[in-house]
Image (tube, rainbow, N blue to C red):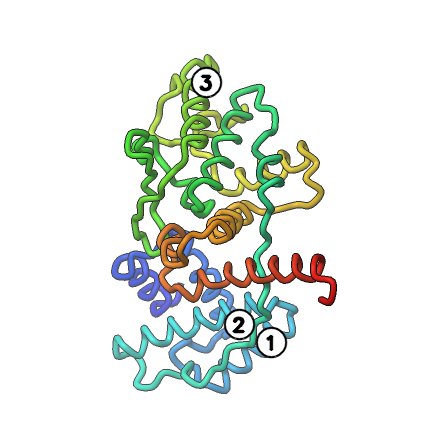
Amino acid sequence: MNDALARFLTYLEVEKNATANTRLNYEIDLRHFVGWLGDRSPESADLDLLRSYLAVIHGEGYAKRTLSRKLATLRSFYRYLTREGTLRKNPATGLRSPKLEKKLPVVLNENEVERLLAFEAKDLTGLRDRAIFETLYSTGCRISELAGLNVRDVDEIGGVIKVMGKGRKERLCPVGEKALEAIRAYREARENDEGNPNGGGGEHLFLNHSRNETGSRLTGRSMRRSLNRRVEQVALGHRISPHALRHSFATHLLNRGADLRVVQELLGHASISTTAIYTHVSAERLKRVYERAHPRA
């Protein structure tokens, strides 16, 4: 690994307290860049060379959001090298970000959420999946935050869950009684499961119950697969990601009169401008209702 790249990754982990997932994404992007450089060192790159690299990966068919992320990685990397004194001038300063198309988030209506959460949970895996989806919709947390939960993070008396958000920032998410009931039902079934090598214990809140990995922490990827199965089970009609439940959480709160800044805190957004997209979702819905109902719309 290039020395500058190794120092930067250590800086992310030690000083910026970046999550393992964030560090991995930076490493993947920078390894791709260093591989493209060949015999040239990253420290020797100038603005023209960086533009050439971006032109090459643009021609490889990457989406604009991926290009934007790779550009942000280069900017962070060269800003670090400049700040530590390795470079006198930051070559990434003149790079321009691609203009991103603004996509409204996928949001389920309240009836669709009810259908999804009403699937028949006959076994331990079903009870676990119901607890996962109830908690996602009840708290609005990210799938990575949910996957990282431990049993001790759930405060049933206080009605809150402690999650580790982006930048390793902890926050408390209120959680509804329906979600707490689902978590209790899953944990009780887990305690009584003779096939669990931990006897239902262990620190992880959501466990893998597949034959080969019983007792290990359930990953975000596995949660996505579980969601796809349940969507097919209830015949929702279209595929969704776990993030759709987070989007639905925010939109339904705003539709019912919640304050935008409160929703910002609940979602763990650093900037209210990120949360403001959900006001656009609400406005779009109002517009559709208006166009259907008004005689001269």
Q: Which residue is found at the position 61% from the left and 24% from the top?
A: 120
**What is the tally of numbered marks visible in this picture?**
3
Name the quadrant containing residue 196: top left
Q: Which residue is mark 2?
A: 36
Labelled pair 1, 3 in contact (Cβ < 8 Å): no
Q: Report, in whole angstroms, how far the alpha carbon at label 2 lies from the one at label 1.
A: 9 Å
Q: Which residue is found at the position 29% from the left and 29% from the top?
A: 157
Whether residue 190 appears in this view of the structure is yes
Where in the figure is residue 290, as x and y percent of width and height?
A: 66, 60
Q: How many residues crowd mark 2 within 10 Å: few (<14), some (14–19), many (20+)?
A: few
Closer to the camera, 31 or 130?
Answer: 130
Local SS, label 2: helix
- Looking at the picture, which amino acid does disc 3 mark? Ala
Where in the figure is residue 198, as x and y percent of width and height?
A: 38, 20
Q: Which residue is mark 1?
A: 56
Whether residue 23 appears in this view of the structure is no
- The disc placed on residue 189 is 3
Q: Report, in whole angstroms, how far the alpha carbon at label 1 lies from the one at label 3.
A: 53 Å
- Asked if residue 245 is positioned above or below residue 272 in the image, the reply reads above
- The disc placed on residue 43 is none
Rendered-image quadrant of the N terminus? bottom left
Labelled pair 2, 1 in contact (Cβ < 8 Å): yes
